[in-house]
Image: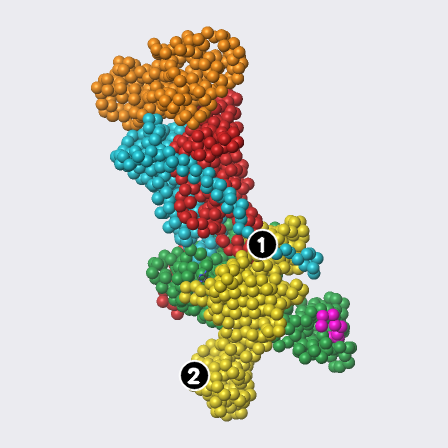
Chain colours: A green, B yellow, C orange, D cyan, E red
Amino acid sequence: MSVTDVEPALLEARLAVSRAGWDLDVDLRIAPGGVTALLGPNGAGKSTTIQALAGLLRISDGRVVLEGDVLDDTRAGVHRPAEERRVGLVFQDYLLFPHMSARDNVAFGLRAHGMPRARAREAADRWLARMDLAAHAARRPKEMSGGQAQRVALARALATEPRLLLLDEPLAALDAGTRMSVRTDLRTHLDEFSGATVVVTHDPLDALVLADHVVVIEGGRVVQAGTPTEIARQPRTRYVASLMGLNLLRGVARQSGVVLEDGTTLTAVDDYDGPVFVVLRPSAIGVYGGQPHGSPRNSWPARITSVEQQGHAVRLAAKGPPDVFVDVTPQAVAELGLTVGSSVWLTVKATDLVVYEC
Amino acid sequence: MSVTDVEPALLEARLAVSRAGWDLDVDLRIAPGGVTALLGPNGAGKSTTIQALAGLLRISDGRVVLEGDVLDDTRAGVHRPAEERRVGLVFQDYLLFPHMSARDNVAFGLRAHGMPRARAREAADRWLARMDLAAHAARRPKEMSGGQAQRVALARALATEPRLLLLDEPLAALDAGTRMSVRTDLRTHLDEFSGATVVVTHDPLDALVLADHVVVIEGGRVVQAGTPTEIARQPRTRYVASLMGLNLLRGVARQSGVVLEDGTTLTAVDDYDGPVFVVLRPSAIGVYGGQPHGSPRNSWPARITSVEQQGHAVRLAAKGPPDVFVDVTPQAVAELGLTVGSSVWLTVKATDLVVYEC
Amino acid sequence: ASSTSSSSSALQPGSTGVLTGSTVVFAAASLKPTFTELAKQFEAAHPGVKVVLSFGGSDTLAAQIKQGAPVDVFAAANNTTMQTVVSSDDAKSPVNFAKNVLEIAVAPGNPNGIKTLADVAKPGLKLALCAKTVPCGSAAQKAFAAAGIDAKPVTYEQDVTSVLTKVELGEADAGLVYRTDVKAAAGKVVGVDFAEADKAVNTYPIAQVGTGKNPNAGKAFEAFVLSPSGQAVLHAAGFEPDA
Amino acid sequence: MTLLEQKPLPAKTSRPPYVLFVLAALGIAFLVLPLVGLLARAPWRSAPSLLGRADVTTALRLSLETATISTAFALVLGVPIAWCLARTRLPARSLLRALCALPLVLPPVAGGIALLLAYGRRGVVGEWLLRAFGVSLPFTTAGVVVAETFVAMPFLIVAVEGALRALDVRYDAAAASLGASRWFTFRHVTLPLVAPGVAAGAVLCWARALGEFGATITFAGSYPGTTQTMPLQVYLALQDDPQAAIVLSLLLLAVSIAVLVGLRDRWWSR
Amino acid sequence: MTLLEQKPLPAKTSRPPYVLFVLAALGIAFLVLPLVGLLARAPWRSAPSLLGRADVTTALRLSLETATISTAFALVLGVPIAWCLARTRLPARSLLRALCALPLVLPPVAGGIALLLAYGRRGVVGEWLLRAFGVSLPFTTAGVVVAETFVAMPFLIVAVEGALRALDVRYDAAAASLGASRWFTFRHVTLPLVAPGVAAGAVLCWARALGEFGATITFAGSYPGTTQTMPLQVYLALQDDPQAAIVLSLLLLAVSIAVLVGLRDRWWSR
Ligand SMILES: Nc1ncnc2c1ncn2[C@@H]1O[C@H](COP(=O)(O)OP(=O)(O)OP(=O)(O)O)[C@@H](O)[C@H]1O
Ligand SMILES: Nc1ncnc2c1ncn2[C@@H]1O[C@H](COP(=O)(O)OP(=O)(O)OP(=O)(O)O)[C@@H](O)[C@H]1O
Ligand SMILES: [Mg+2]
Ligand SMILES: [Mg+2]
């Protein structure tokens, strides 16, 4: 865990939830004012984690402590209801109250805390203005577009000044322009009130930009946690690697090189012994029509299984072993006549392999 | 429009919808087998367009012709109901039938067309398997994660073999891995049945990768349409430019250079006369602590208004005039001590300006 | 009383010989105990016949007859109702077969010491009466008029059973009901006779109805009601013969 | 490829769901014909004089007042019951639910007797009411309200519970995450969202209370001005003047049509 | 910054909504006490012999059968009516809706008379039925079903319309985009989604039909075995043996509790 122990944690949680054929068991530690991104494939348990933290789902085992308050402790039988937690939540499907205008949706939390209607509405209007929604304050959720609804949901959660703010894919429906300003606003706001935020996102860019701590969940377990840079540089699962656009291979480092799980051997410059991860940048892999005779120490035959245009590059999926993604220029595709089914040779320089311990 | 007139259009539509304080008026022309991306800021009218095409919203004026069938024609009083159009739709919030399992959701359309239950279920199971959801076939929507639900919605729409498939942000809730495979599947599938797809997406990458034609809508109007490359190279609105990560400025080309709307002048190498757009890549802009004396022909003082880490680069927002975004390395930030409020000089080479007619 | 002779030909039991099938008898709800017994005896005497009894408010039954309900015999709780059926040509020549006399029903032990009709008009006493539009109500009005008493009831009930229920459950301290009702209540209320009761006698007419499918059996049943054994059953329940 | 294995799906030509329209038309005819029958047979000549009679207007006013007050009581007590049944894990919940529906099944006269046993002078609660406050419900207008509430409240409970069950509970979760107490959430989220269901229940309840006869006459008796509501007057009129009864019924119907048409479109349309 | 202008919001300490619990408890007590009263007064000694009587079991069977058949009819006719009221733009919709609710308001005896005027031997439809098919409804078991359906169907209609209005219409849109006709959508999407509302309506309807008295006795008469349902028997028992009437009422209640508890948890829990 990257949050050092000297820093007092705002939130310390161990959550276990069990469901038919599936269970969740995660540890989280979040520093005050920090933004933690929760990354993971669909069905990994991100929304479940967030709902358990908000108190909307009773954990079957574990303990949640926020700012010293024990919110959940299954041993001691403690379960503080959601409304006492001051934990804000933006739902994946917004859940705006359909019978209220945008303004009243945002004012709801303030009024629930006893603020008079007029003042709550004024505050709501300010929030809506910040979200660029001043013109839509009187609209019902049904009369708003998806992105507008999501911004209202965000404003609604922020308005109550939660100690911990949980956002389930808050930026998914926002357009590029709004996304950036909402994101910046979010940071500004969080910096101010010293709370903390947990953001579920599928966009690795969002995670890297927004978060100062990333927790990766797969199959209900934390598989990796650390700063964005750590995660980006040294992914520990295939999912994380693919998220970062990298190839991740696993093997055992020997003197001769790294013996991969599929039996092939790659030569690397790093000096390790024992189980390791090997990361290959797709753009560092060369493609040749026949067996190459150049400097790269590693080369192997492969078959192209998919060709996809990505921005200005073309991404190939190649079946080895080892199987890798390769980024090439459109010119290379044209010159080599690459299509699905083409047989090629792949090469990579030993210096381009990143190797680190499992 | 980039769809040439020799190619017969699958869909030709002019749609007008008017609402209190807002109206939509767009022309669309979609080639068979093509994928059109509908891009636009929140509230631009993308969902409205798509719903009108699906027949779920009655247009107030216009005409929709699909494969020669007149689906809507307000002059002639024609309005074919949604169920007769064979136009598939994936809703922004999925709208899975909550009382049915994933399998029955997918089988629904087939059964509605008269396929016997058992065969429809088998077909549904194949679709779910392709979406990597075989294990969730018996689950109710409530018991699925957001991403799983979205994939079921996608399978449900695809299963009915629509002539035209409309997808409202179909990839937003999908994780990176699934996204790629669903995207590839989608293309494969569409290539097969010669239908066409309209995808609403906020992710410019999705649009560039998936689509062979992009239509940009702002404020209920088509502001630009063309191939992804055209859109990426020559954005015609600030929104499109920011989507592509570019700076877009507007001005009038004179002999002396381009006189921008804010009054400043930039020197360019292209020879134009009259109103033009100027595109500046954020990474092509240099940042200096004081007034520079080098080769770049254009330089101006500016103040930094935001600093944001983006992957391995840092994006600065700079207030000029002209106002631009600048990408620099973290080293540069450290060396120049760049923070919000810093005064700097910006430079750009005349050869790095892309100028084209308005 | 004057027209009993018209049906005297059917009076001899057994003379009709081959009575079969079922016959439908509509009777006022207050006749339920007696007519159930009468039907049992009649069926015993005529093994081939089944008497189908349908009880209800006299007016409800009359409305049904006017709508063509298949009925052989109608026994009503008052002449007015019977008259509506006769005037619509659904029934012929009604005969009075019994009369009923009002009593004051009070709780067992008569806690309020009610002796005369005047006692029920005492202030503070909760008196329940039938509504003026139903027979027991109009009878009560006649009795009060005869006694020159201005009664102040707390309620005008829709039928005599409701009055009885109120007294039984102690909601009302007294109520004007028929002697037969007091008898049927079997000790849960007691009856107090009063002098003016003679002025408010209610007669029960019976008649053949044209809509029925078994007029012969119907005729025989009517005759049985009017026969001495029939009258004995009625008398045992508290009815008096319509002399 | 999955799709190549199957024949292309046929294009649908959809028609409006005639079955539904036909059945609905049949149903409406079934309900409306008897009312037409009443209208056809009504003695229109004598109607005006009848409607001007003081006892008729008194009974009508009494009916409207008691039905409205009963509906108010039923709302205050019944909506919380429905909420508890739909949203809490009470023990023996389904038994409780069935108990609440029982007044529906009880023949109204039996219901009146049951009320007397509980709230009459000698009833468990009634005796205590009398001793403690000198209040006796039978033969009073309050008694009419009690009888009508007893008979009509279950309609409200069942309708509101149905509406609550159809509502997404996650709205409650959203409100809780914003710090709203359950009571605040109930007032500001749950109740407004089930408003159509509550309105439906209130209409049912009001209508049932307005037509209530058996329990009212048994529990509260029938005295002009205090407890004699329209249905009692209709019943009594049937005894001696069936034509008048028809007119009175039609009057009751006309008034309630006016109220229902007036209220419901305002309440229901959102 | 917006937030610095306002004091930090106070932390909430939320309690369960006692108001709701207290009101619900009061309401349940109000409804249940009369039943307790009935139970306390019932002559338990004589009950077994009464319940074994052939006429009692016959009446009970008849009641259950007719109530169930009536509910089935009400479902077949009433659900389409509710759908039309909630989902189409019929002209004069709110008038139609009020008309459908009228049998609720009509005092049951007046309802019976209205039924006679329409479906009786001399009624508009009844005369035609008789001439064309030789069918006469009054005084038959079919007549009981007609009377019960007439009185009880409005409950179903109102409950189902409420449920339909609370349902997101966009599910219909989703079904249409998948090529489903409105009829297919109705059967496979709309109906299952409003199932709780339909169940609530059916329960109300069944219970109301089971307790129906006034319209039945007026329209169908009271013949043992054919038209004498339990409520009629309770009414008649009141004439000579009030204790028996209480036992019969309780029997009716017990049977319906059994049915409601048995059915509803299966229907409702999803
Ligand atoms: N039912 C409605 N009534 C009134 N206005 C509406 C309604 N639905 C949408 N609008 C408005 O119409 C405009 C277009 O909405 P639409 O949903 O088409 O936007 P969109 O392009 O899909 O946006 P997003 O990307 O946020 O989903 C918006 O300004 C929205 O507020
Ligand atoms: N109510 C439920 N009952 C049973 N299983 C459920 C329920 N809700 C979710 N699940 C399952 O639990 C797992 C975790 O779901 P969760 O919603 O936490 O995933 P997620 O990480 O948020 O995914 P996504 O990115 O797709 O939203 C999934 O496999 C899902 O199918
Ligand atoms: Mg999720
Ligand atoms: Mg949209």
Q: From the viewer's perspective, tell me whether residue C133 is left or right of residue B268.
A: left
Which residue occupies 51% across, 21% down? E53
Report if residue C59 is visible in the image. Answer: yes
Give, as a single range, the part of the protein colored magenta.
A339-350
Which residue appears farthest toward the front when viewing the image? E131
- Please give the chain letter of the residue carrying mark 1: D
**Some atom of ligand 1 lies within 8 Å of the CB belonging to the residue at label 2:** no
Q: Secondary structure at mark 2?
A: loop
Q: Secondary structure at mark 1?
A: loop
What residue does disc 1 label?
A: D13
Which residue occupies 43% across, 63% down? B19
Where residue B336 sits in the image (x, y, percent)? 50, 84
Amino acid found under the numbered disc labelled 2: Asp
Q: Is residue A347 magenta?
A: yes
Amino acid found under the numbered disc labelled 1: Thr
Q: Nearer the viewer, residue D235 or E91?
A: E91
Where residue D255 sits in the image (x, y, percent)? 34, 41
- State the separation of the CA atoms marked 2 and 1: 58 Å
Which residue occupies 53% across, 89% down? B271
Q: From the viewer's perspective, tell me whether residue E125 is left or right of residue A123.
A: right
Report if residue D157 is visible in the image. Answer: no
Which residue occupies 33% across, 31% down? D244
Residue E124 marker: none
**Is residue E173 positioned above or below C201 on the image?**
below
- Please give the chain letter of the residue carrying mark 2: B
What residue does disc 2 label?
A: B262
